[in-house]
Amino acid sequence: MSGHALERRVYLGEREIKEMKRVTIQDIAKKLNLSRNTVSKALNNSDTVSYETRFLVIETAYEMGYSKLSPVVLNEFKVRNKIDETKSIVVLTRREISFFWNNIIMGISDELNKFGCKLQFNFISEEDEKNLVIPLDLKEEVDGLIILSIFSDDYINQIMKQNIPVVFLDGPVELSNLNQYGDIIICEGRNSIRTITLDLISRGLTKIGFIGDTTYSKTISERYEGFLSAMQTAGIHLDISIIANYHTTHKFYKKEEVEEAIDRFPYMPEAIVCANDDIALFTMRHLNNKGLSVPEDVAVTGYDNIEVIAQAEPVLTTVRVGNQRLGRRLVQKLMWRLQNPAFPKEVVYVNSEVIFRKSSDKRK
């Protein structure tokens, strides 16, 4: 062994490389005829250095055995040079009680198979979130992360310490804090709910209520904005006594919360715009139990086009996003991010389609 460097073997992913303990930033700079400052910025993935220069520095540092490459920078190198053919993708979510998630997960699985990736699925309990316990999978070598649920800021901060590229489905009402960590996919809701509400108004209905926890997520908040926009456009007075947009423990995913909200209304609205299909189903069942018919007595609308609920009688006016397509889009965005880690984080809206059915077919 030569006297100017001490060699030992380390493992990065599945590849064994030689690490030269005395390789420094200055060594890399000298080899590439670049300044030490430029090399330092490149190794830290600074966008003040051109992408091609960053890649050249990363590639050279890796080949020389530089030991301080960050996980994000190393990941960029691995993607460009296909060092690691099989990527490991972790999906995190809560144990939701809605049918909404089934097709999204199928879409994620199908698309990851196309990319030859390994899927690791983790349910996060309320206790783990509260105690900031992250899955063991994240402490191993993971290439990317898809987060389907909205977790607390503290829990997200704990996850982000792992320096793993991430794509979020939805986010809190204020997205700015989350968007610094990763890309966000949002289902369009403002225009679609506005369209649904305007249709109800065109039928002569003016006493229109709303149910949905607008404090919970950006998507629910924007659906409510669409409802408000339609009411304002039509010049209809908003009666807040038939608006249930406050925070609830289960975000109206429990029928008891929906029933309590309806029972609080001082009178029965002519129509109720629900933030999702689960709320709409609970609403229709409760109205039926009270001896009221949908849509003859009260028109009801939803969002999500959940197949099981959409086929309920009367068939539900709703909004189709295409959940398998949405799952595939999450994977596609993550794959793009793995190849382009230095690009600014993005918020991407996925278009939706209003489906008018019998449940909103009420005329005054």
Image (tube, rainbow, N blue to C red):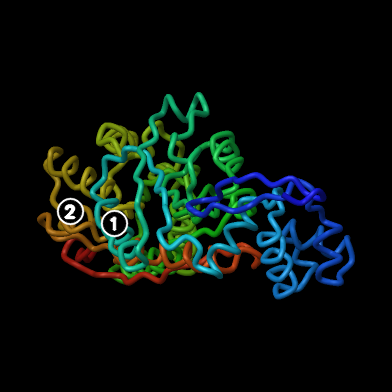
Residue in the image at 63% along x and 52% along y: 18
User: Residue 168's x, y, as percent?
Assistant: 48, 53
Using the rendered image of the protein, determine whether residue 319 is visible from the camera's viewpoint.
no
Near-viewer residue (277 or 181): 181
Residue 6 shows in the view: yes
Side of 293 where 114 appears, left or right: right
State the residue in front, 287 or 241: 287
Pointer 1 local density, CA inside 10 Å: few below 14, some 14–19, many at least 20: many
Task: Please rate how many residues cluster around mark 2, counting C-alpha atoms within 10 Å: few if below 14, some from 14 to 19, many from 20.
Answer: many
User: What amino acid does circle 1 point to?
Assistant: Gly
**Amino acid at dot 2:** Ile
- Kindly identify the residue that appears in the image at 66 percent across and 59 percent down: 62
Classify 118 as above or below 6: below
C-alpha distance separating marks 1 and 2: 10 Å
Up the image or down, 111 lies above or below 293; here it is below
Label whose residue precedes the other's in the sequence (1 or 2) = 1
- Residue matched to label 2: 309
Q: Quadrant of residue 318?
A: bottom left
On residue 302, the disc is: 1
Asked whether disc 1 touches disc 2, contact meaning CB atoms under 8 Å apart, the reply is yes
Q: Nearer the viewer, residue 241 or 359?
A: 359
Question: Which residue is drawn at the image coordinates 49% and 28% (left, top)?
Answer: 133
